[in-house]
Image (tube, helix red, strand yellow):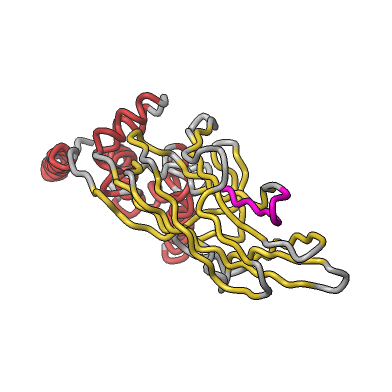
């Protein structure tokens, strides 16, 4: 059976509108955005590198990292910052030593703030990694924890001042032992406030092309502004047209689309970013529910 003319015209009009909208939006740049990224207690792996999450949402759980040393030494905390590329390569933005250093030379606890001037990074950034170091007196710096954003962060870093907040604690114990703790996650608001620029869509397109992501290159004008909905429209609408032509049943077509597109092995899961995979499961569950309803009521 042929597709009804009204349906064909509607589909063609839809793609025309999306295409024109995408072309007009390509040059849009969202400059100088400030974001507070929390040091979370849960971990993940990004581009082959493991670390705790660095995210704009705080974790419900918390972690306390404690080290000790003899005598009443001052305790210091500082950070080093890296860019993480899609291939797992890293590029340090700091100068090889910890920056934004805070200190405690007496017992106490609470948030301590320090700043660092980011030198800027004009290429698109896939992920940012922050490593926290600790030192007693002049003994030497030791790595305590690594934090990394999700991949596909896709921002540029202007020259700007970043503010680091560490929840630290120092306690002098029995036997002349000094204990130093860094706490993050939960109610401990250890974080970094950074500034970044969101690049234009065409810059992201060619970044994807350079990294061999052909789907990302082709569909960026849609997905950059529509997100997961963009993937759904691009992939499921053509499939829906084919299914409707075959069955001429709108309900059956919708159910089939939900089942085909949803789930970890669904059509969309092969191309959407990791953050969108939970939406694939939503589609799959809706498809199962619709199928069961159809079976019960038929």
Vertical relation: 192 (above or below) 118: below
> Which residue sits at x=58%, y=66%?
185
Task: Between residue 275 and residue 207, name the one nearer to us.
Answer: 207
Q: Could you say which is closer to the camera, residue 71 or residue 232?
A: 71
What quarter of the picture does the N terminus occupy?
A: top left
* Point 19% across, 38% down: residue: 26
Q: Does the image show residue 291?
A: no
Is 102 drawn above or below residue 128 in the view shown? below
Q: Position of residue 182 (x, y in %)?
A: 64, 63
Whether 130 is among the magenta residues is no
- Report whether residue 9 is seen: yes
Q: What stretch is highlighted in magenta?
A: 131-139
Nearer-the-camera pick, 156 or 22:
156
Location of residue 271 by image quarter: top left
State the predominant SS element of the stretch in magenta.
strand
Q: Is residue 136 magenta?
A: yes
State the residue at coordinates (88%, 70%). 175
In-image side of 74 versus 40 (left or right): right
Q: Along the line of sight, which residue is nearer the eye, 224 or 240? A: 224
Q: Residue at x 49, y 64 (%)?
A: 113
Image coords of residue 166 (percent x, y): 55, 63
Whole-percent x and y of residue 79?
55, 50
In the picture, the quarter occupied by the C terminus is bottom left
Question: Which quarter of the figure has residue 223?
Answer: top left
Q: Residue 240, percent across and down?
A: 31, 43
Q: Which residue lies furthest to the right in this view?
A: 175
């Amino acid at each position: 059976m042929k597709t009804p003319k009204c349906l064909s015209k509607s589909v063609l009009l839809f793609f025309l509108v999306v295409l024109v909208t995408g072309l007009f939006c390509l040059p849009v740049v969202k400059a100088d955005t400030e974001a507070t990224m929390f040091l979370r207690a849960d971990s993940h792996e990004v581009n082959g590198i493991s670390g705790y999450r660095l995210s704009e949402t705080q974790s419900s759980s918390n972690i306390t990292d404690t080290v000790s040393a003899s005598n009443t030494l001052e305790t210091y905390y500082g950070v080093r910052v890296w860019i993480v590329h899609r291939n797992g390569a890293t590029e340090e933005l700091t100068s090889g030593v910890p920056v934004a250093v805070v200190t405690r030379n007496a017992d106490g606890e609470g948030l301590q703030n320090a700043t660092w001037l980011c030198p800027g990074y004009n290429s698109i950034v896939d992920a940012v990694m922050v490593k926290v170091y600790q030192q007693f007196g002049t003994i030497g710096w030791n790595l305590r924890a690594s934090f990394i954003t999700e991949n596909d962060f896709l921002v540029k870093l202007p020259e700007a001042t970043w503010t680091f907040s560490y929840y630290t604690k120092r306690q002098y114990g029995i036997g002349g032992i000094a204990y130093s703790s860094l706490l993050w996650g939960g109610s401990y608001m250890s974080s970094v406030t950074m500034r970044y620029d969101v690049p234009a869509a065409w810059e992201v397109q060619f970044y994807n092309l350079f990294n061999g992501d052909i789907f990302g290159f082709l569909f960026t004008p849609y997905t950059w502004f529509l997100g997961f909905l963009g993937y759904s429209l691009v992939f499921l609408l053509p499939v829906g047209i084919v299914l409707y032509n075959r069955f001429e049943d709108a309900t059956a077509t919708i159910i089939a689309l939900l089942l085909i597109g949803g789930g970890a092995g669904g059509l969309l899961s092969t191309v959407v970013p990791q953050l969108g995979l939970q939406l694939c499961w939503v589609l799959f569950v809706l498809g199962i529910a619709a199928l069961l309803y159809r079976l019960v009521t038929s």
